[in-house]
Image: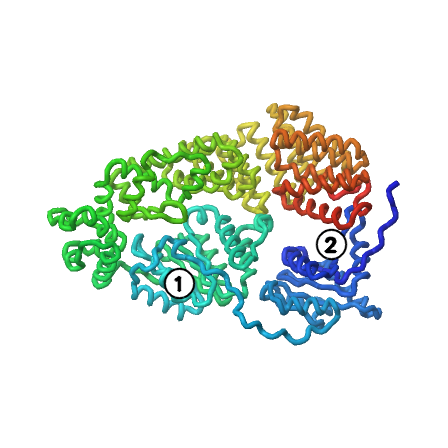
Amino acid sequence: MRNEARRPTPTYDAFISYNSADLDSVRRLAQRLHEQGFEVFLDEWCLVPGETWQEALIEALDSSPCCLVMCGPQGVGPWQNEEVHAAIEARVRGRTMRVLPVLLPGSADTTWRSAPFLGRFTYCDFRQGLEQARVFERLCAGIRGQAPGPPPPAAPSTPAKPAPTDFRSRFTVTAGTWRRVSAVEAARGAVITGGGAPVVLYGLPGVGKTTVLCDVADECRSDRTVLALPMGGTAAAEPRYLVDEVNTWLETAFGRGLPAEDLYRQEWPDALAALLRHVAGERLLVLLDDLIDGPFADTVLRTFAALPDTVVLATARGHLGTGHEAVHVAVPPLSPKESHEFIAHVAKSMGLPVAPEDVTARLPDDVLSHPLALRTFLAHTRFVPAPLLTDSRLPVDVLSARALVATVVARLPAAHRGALAHAVALDRVPLADLLEAGVTLPPGFTAALHDLAGRCLVSHAAGGIEVPRLVAEALDVADPSAGRAALCDVAARLGEAVREADDTALAPLARVLPRTALMLVTAGQWRALQEMIPPGFLDRLNSGGFWKEYVLLARALISAADHLRDVTPRVRLRVRVSRKMGQLGDTRAAWDLVREAETLAGALDSTSLRGDLAGLRAFLAYLQGDDTSTLRELKGCVELRTRDGDAGGLLIAHKLEGNVHLRRGKYRKAAAAYRAALAAGGEEADPRHRTDAETSLAICDFRQGNNEAAAVRLERVVREMRALSVLGELPRALHALALVHESQGLSARALEVARQAALARANDPAVRAAVDRLVWRLENLGPGAGPRAGRADA
């Protein structure tokens, strides 16, 4: 017989009281304390599922000599306030209880001193970052009830600094290029006198804004850590790319990156601000290249400028109309003196047989004043004598900046011009990702790139190819059809790879497709876009966790459907994006898409589309915890699905109904809804939704004490998921099966299954956290610590 005696209450070194908004920082501190040998009570580690948590918290506080009160940006939470009162009352009753406020990054004095009686206690101040060794020593001493003592002698060696950032390579700017002294000095002066405001360098395309940015950065970086971010392309179209880049930099430079699930639960401005709070005490130099005027640029500038002791430098295509107090510095065309110096520098570095005086005498002012056009002309003198390029009989407008580059492009062999058109279509796409995804490059493309690079028409950047905008525009002038044909060819090659892609090709395709999709949108190649991304591939991206790519591509397809006036895709793609935005926590944007879809012409004429919209409204209401609205919308959805004979839609609707009842603890109603879902869908239903409903039905059996039936059903579902490669919901099913085995007294088997769930790595952060808690409990607390039959953390 299983031992039913209540396990003795453990004794802890410290009880951790915290606001759930600060859980990430709290976990990191708790882990460090655990590594130092302290037994700390953190509710998500120590509460036993099925027991009354209020009583367990009181018992843990009573058995702890120290209460750590974590104070973050949101202050002390309501239940946390009760814990603090209980700890202080214990002191009043004469019990040895130390109350130690711990100030987390982002907290202010008012957020913790305003808590009743808390301001009179000595605190540990982590507001400058959780990695402060001396503050952590004070925290450990406070838990022990000891004075921290004087700090240890300073180590003779200099603390390690983050590795320098190679921002020139990041922006495709060659080191040792000619330095525009006047522009650099003007920008540097703006940094010094600007009072900490961002400095934005703006000017015409190709005048060298990014080169000036890098030269100014060299003078301003000193001991600052550099964050270099390209702001065009995917970052401007889908800001979560920017958030991911900052998170990667934060982990690489400081080891402070955040889990992806913590970022995806917030809107992107909040996620960016949350990341930057982790470097609030660092001296930073932030470089933002190619900002585009609009709300995105405004938000980015405001967020980075809010950091203390941070220099923000940016480039833009024009003066930004931002409400932020940015200092704008124009990067003008070259002066005659600068043109002469520039020609001399390029001729020497490239070994060209030209004299600056001869070139300046032959070329018109608009060419001499434009660095990119001038460099292109000088590179071309490798192959054609300068006098022929500047024949006086040619009209002056032919030798204007764009016409000059267009002439160079027009004189290319046809194969090279085709390769240049493909390079434009593949601009900044990593070639290694193309090859890994199984995309074939056009014949002769790689060989032609070498000659194009020698003429300064393309450059290699970050494993891909970059084509200056002026060159791309020149190609449109010289051969208007070449660019469109190459872009459609690239899209067709990608579409073929998408249709043949196995799971290993998903990641490289997710990195390649967004940029090409944006180019197709810009070019108005709507059919090519639709053929490149079949709807089933969006489902694969979603299941694989490529959510920002899923959203960007779906939005691109919405643009195509709108232009082609395809009613059904216009509605259903908005439904897709709305569901995902809701899942990512941006319910405001999700509801905006609902209203947008409902106003489309013809959206309410179709029973099927009305059912889609009713189901979407129910889903969003469910995410917001509005069960009454969810059930009301589901009633209408089921009627529409039944009328339309949509078995798959009925399965999903009944499954959501079951989820509502399961959340309410009404297990019989939930089980009935899940059985209705399975009956409606039948064996031909979508395996992902069907097996998910089976898992939920098994959880209902378990909650009602029918453990044997739950175990049989879950074991069958797990086998089926593995056989069909429906792995997205596998961790949840394994977690439920482990709980069932634990309730049956099969602790070793439960631990084995729980570890399988941990290895499967759920996309849902809530499931992942539940699995991690279960594995920890089974490994550390052993048999008898888990739930009885019908009581589970499922």
At label 2, counting other C-alpha atoms closer than 10 Å, the crowd grade (few under 14, some 14-19, many 20 or more) is some
| Residue 418: percent from left, percent from top | 29, 37
Q: Residue furthest left?
A: 393
- Real-space Cα distance between discs 1 and 2? 47 Å
Residue holding disc 2: 43
Residue 115 in sight from this viewpoint: yes
Q: Position of residue 521 (x, y in %)?
A: 40, 39
Whether pointer 1 and pointer 2 mark residues with C-beta atoms closer than 8 Å, the reply is: no
Look at 66% across and 63% down and name the residue there: 71
Left or right relative to 645: residue 230:
left
Report x, y in % for residue 647: 62, 25
Query: Residue 614: horizontal and vertical position, in percent?
Result: 60, 34
Q: Is residue 753 above or below residue 42?
A: above
Q: Is residue 460 left or right of residue 36?
A: left
Amino acid on which the number 2 mark rests in the picture = Asp
Q: Residue at image x 43%, y 67%?
A: 222
Asked if residue 113 can be seen in this view, the reply is no
Sequence-first tag of 1 and 2: 2
Report the quarter where the C terminus lies: top right
What sort of colour scheme is used for the picture? rainbow
- Of residue 572 and residue 89, the one placed in the foreground of this image is 89
Q: Quadrant of the N terminus?
A: top right
Q: Residue flagged by tag 1: what amino acid is it?
A: Ala
Q: Which corner quadrant of the image does residue 576 belong to?
A: top right
Tag shown at residue 217: 1
Judge from the rendering whether residue 633 lies leftward or rightward of residue 479; answer left or right.
Answer: right
